[in-house]
Image (cartoon, grey):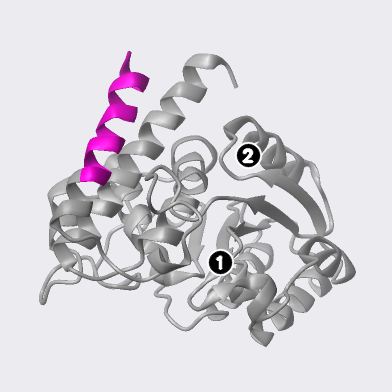
Amino acid sequence: MNIADTNQMKLLATKARKGAIVGTFNAKSGHPGGSLSAADIFTYLYFKEMNVDPKNPQWADRDRFVLSKGHCCPSLYAVLALKGFFDMSELEKLRHVGAMLQGHPDMKGTPGIDMSTGSLGQGISAACGMALCAKIDSKDFRVYTVLGDGECEEGEVWEAAMFASHKGLDNLVVFVDCNGLQIDGSTAQVGGVEPLDTKFESFGFNVLKIDGHDFEQIESALNNARQTKGKPTAIIAKTVKGKGVSFMENQVSWHGKATNAEEFEIAIKELDAQIKELEG
């Protein structure tokens, strides 16, 4: 990526982080920490990698995306809004009764959402099904999914991984957002999920480890995945929970709570400053 492209990606990702904070603040609930850690991945996928059309969300030949860690949808919603699937004002209605944007992705009510996700571990299975359908129907679309590292404690993740490898789903890319924290502590303390790279390798995956906030590394990993034949790819992305908001970074307490008015003001001020700098 050239400098201009990288700066544009950073700008969009920062705006997505701001959207996630706006959404969770107005909802008075939600999951900002993991939303912020995955924002760069969402941004790159929708603005550089995936073949999608906001004007035709149900286009049969589009690439598919499944947010397996569905509770971290606030920044995904912001990316979808920035891409043009719906208006940014919808973010302010997050989790409100009758609103489009729910606390977990809803494929029936939200343009751009390819799979409803809730219980952890299930999204990757749905992504495997989509990838297999593409193979059966001789379609060229690719399938992407994002898991949390804590989510990898779910047995269904490894059932899906075994299936993906067995079926040779080289049109499937699994991102693991490794921010090292989950609802009640560090992943090392709670479930001991590491080493994720060798685990996925043992299930027959092409495995890459990257900095999940480095767009050049994201691009390189996805290029590698496209060139890999006969096996699925897992991209283990090291990230910072709460990335972009100083008092949230690496703090497990921000897994599942919204900012109050004072915290909201501080967070928005910080993100606006980053946006202003990136806009030059």
Residue at (73% x, 76% y) in the render:
192
Q: Which mark is residue 160?
A: none
Mark 1–mark 2 contact, CB under 8 Å?
A: no
Q: Which mark is residue 218?
A: 2
Magenta portion: prevailing SS class: helix
Q: Decide: few, some or many residues near mark 2? Use Cα within 10 Å; few <14, some 14-19, many ≥20.
A: many
Magenta segment includes 200: no
Residue at (48% x, 76% y) in the render:
183
Q: How many labels were placed on the picture?
A: 2
Which three-letter amino acid code belongs to the residue tagged 2? Answer: Ile
Whether residue 270 is situated above or below residue 41 in the rendered picture: above
Most foreground residue, 247 or 255: 247
Which three-letter amino acid code belongs to the residue tagged 1? Answer: Leu
Front position among marks 1 and 2? 1
Q: Is residue 38 left or right of residue 280?
A: right
Q: Which residues are magenta?
A: 266-280
Q: Is residue 96 visible?
A: yes
Identify the image quadrant of residue 156. Answer: bottom right
Whether residue 264 is situated above or below residue 9 in the rendered picture: below
Q: Spatial distance from mark 1 to mark 2, Cα to Cα? A: 21 Å
Identify the image quadrant of residue 112. Answer: bottom left
Q: Quadrant of the C terminus?
A: top left
Q: Please give the residue where the numbered disc 1 appears in the rendered image.
A: 181
Most foreground residue, 62 or 151: 151
Residue at (55% x, 74% y) in the render:
185
